[in-house]
Image (spheres, coloured by chain):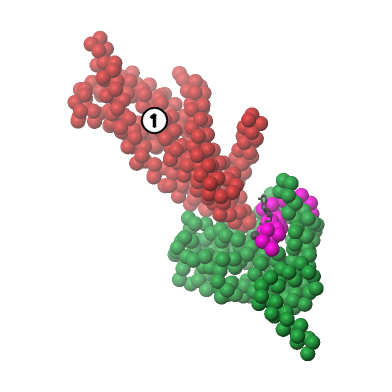
Amino acid sequence: MIAEGLETTGKYILLMKRVFSRPERIRVYLKQYVKEIEQLGINSIGIVLLISLFIGAVITIQIKLNIESPWMPRWTVGYITREIMLLEFSSSIMCLILAGKVGSNISSEIGSMRVTQQIDALEIMGVNSASFLILPKILALVTIIPLLVTFSICAGIIGAYCTCWFGGILNASDLSYGLQYNFVEWYAWSSFIKSLFFAFIIASVSSFYGYSVKGGSIEVGKASTDSVVSCSVLILFSDLILTNLLKL
Amino acid sequence: MIEINTIEKSFEEKKVLKGISTTFKTGETNLIIGESGSGKTVLMQCIVGLLTPEKGEVKYDHRDLLKMGKLETQKLRREMGMLFQSAALFDSMTVLENVMFPLNMFSDKTLREQTRRALTCLDRVNLKGADTKFPGEISGGMQKRVAIARAIALNPHYLFCDEPNSGLDPKTSLVIDALIHEITKEYGMTTIINTHDMNSVMSIGENILFINKGKNEWEGSKENILSSNNKKLNSFIFASDLFKKVKEIEVNQVKE
Ligand SMILES: Nc1ncnc2c1ncn2[C@@H]1O[C@H](COP(=O)(O)OP(=O)(O)OP(=O)(O)O)[C@@H](O)[C@H]1O
Ligand SMILES: [Mg+2]
């Protein structure tokens, strides 16, 4: 079990060494990079907005119903909603969701290229297939993730306001006051920093699983499941460590 | 010219190649024939370096593949073209983009010259109007032909074809065989073809290697393959009635 884990880690590091070697043709990589930004980033905006909007609204309602009492200040609800969204939801939980969407997409795409010999075809042409397929994905996800986190935070806040405007759960000006109360800018930055790490984990780990597929379509499916599980565990683990390192 | 020397390759316990040596000649179509499972694909993958044999040498015009570093191998591979048993086209790209890919990656041509070259290659394999289609939208035979076009886009010195006509009808097979043969002559390439199709053997087998149970069993050309006395080769060739009859007729002719 431990030996197996070490072996997998070793293989992962060797693959990353090949991924981060000098690209053959910057222009072709750039084209690939733009394509991946669209496929991995732009196409995820919808789900990020949707989920964040609802979670923002639900958190507001829950907190309002559960902890509001006469001796709590009225801004408490807005304050807590902001902290939850900023500190954990928009970075860590969002990336867990993306590990499911983007991670399985990456590993099944690369995995099926492996089993249909498209990766062998790249190798025979003299292309560094690891770098060509994986590097643009990693870079694309790492560059687009701060944008997704920003969108998630904004959508969460809009969701919170929706409960005031349409649900009449609480007063919008109380919510605004709470959302701005005692704002620490560093929290937003630490959220972005964490998300960069998570993006790297999602892209590289799921590429690794896809790239090492052997066999046929069953193995591709298995690789895709494995990659989601591993990404999630690694994200949670590094969340623990990063949160500890990044605290004020 | 590609020379291989005592190549051995096994998977876990199973020994697939037990010391194969031969020379593949430049400007000729070199065929590797043998039963299904005899190790043709494994041998070809050892030659191109997708698999590493445990023992032996693979020399491309006196350059030893197995002693090269990664970068040298990558450079040598730019002189190779390969047609896989499953065409292995990039399915996120159109036919034209597939053929342009190696040009894009390795040539210094302008985009317009690349496009022109790619269209020439597609024209060469009789696939003019298909350039905007995706691999999923064309037939198996067309995919194979696109793969040939992609393999020859950079004028390779070495061409490898793994079962170029498996799963194709006899007529399309003939067209593809003839195409590979013509291209080999035209560009003076060293071409190696895996096949178990006797029609291909009889039409383009200039230099034939018959492998059986991981060993070279017989070498020769299409002219002397039918008259060979090798028992295993005979049982391979004359598995089909048609060739049995051809043999009988030949024998009768000799008697008369
Ligand atoms: N990756 C692998 N792992 C284990 N065994 C393998 C592997 N690849 C091939 N083999 C074994 O090697 C033997 C030769 O296989 P190979 O694919 O070379 O046959 P072939 O001559 O190309 O057959 P066909 O004409 O059907 O394509 C088979 O018995 C197969 O089981
Ligand atoms: Mg085969």
Which chain wears red? A
**Residue A84: % across, % down:** 36, 24
* Residue drawn where x is 69% and y is 63% of the image: B35
Q: Which residue is mark 1?
A: A90
Which residue is more in the foreground, B18 or A56? Answer: B18
Give the chain of mark 1.
A
Q: Is residue A122 visible?
A: no
Q: Is mark 1 within 8 Å of ligand 1?
A: no
Q: Residue furthest top?
A: A71
Which residue is more in the foreground, B228 or A161? Answer: B228
Check residue B140 for magenta coloring.
Answer: no
Which stretch appears magenta?
A: B35-56
As displayed, is residue B45 above or below residue A220? below
Check residue B38 for magenta coloring.
Answer: yes
Q: Does residue B112 appear left or right of residue A42 in this picture?
A: right
Which residue is more in the foreground, B127 or B245? Answer: B245
As displayed, is residue A225 above or below residue A238? below
As displayed, is residue B216 above or below residue A15? below
For badge 1, the amino acid type reads Ser
**Residue B3: % across, % down:** 77, 62
Q: Ligand 2 is in which quadrant of the figure? A: bottom right
Position of the N terminus of chain B by quadrant: bottom right
* Residue drawn where x is 51% and y is 44% of the image: A221
* Residue drawn where x is 63% and y is 64% of the image: B163
Which quadrant of the view contains residue A212? Answer: top right
Position of the C terminus of chain B by quadrant: bottom right
* Residue drawn where x is 28% and y is 17% of the image: A66
Which chain wears green? B
Q: Is residue A210 visible?
A: yes
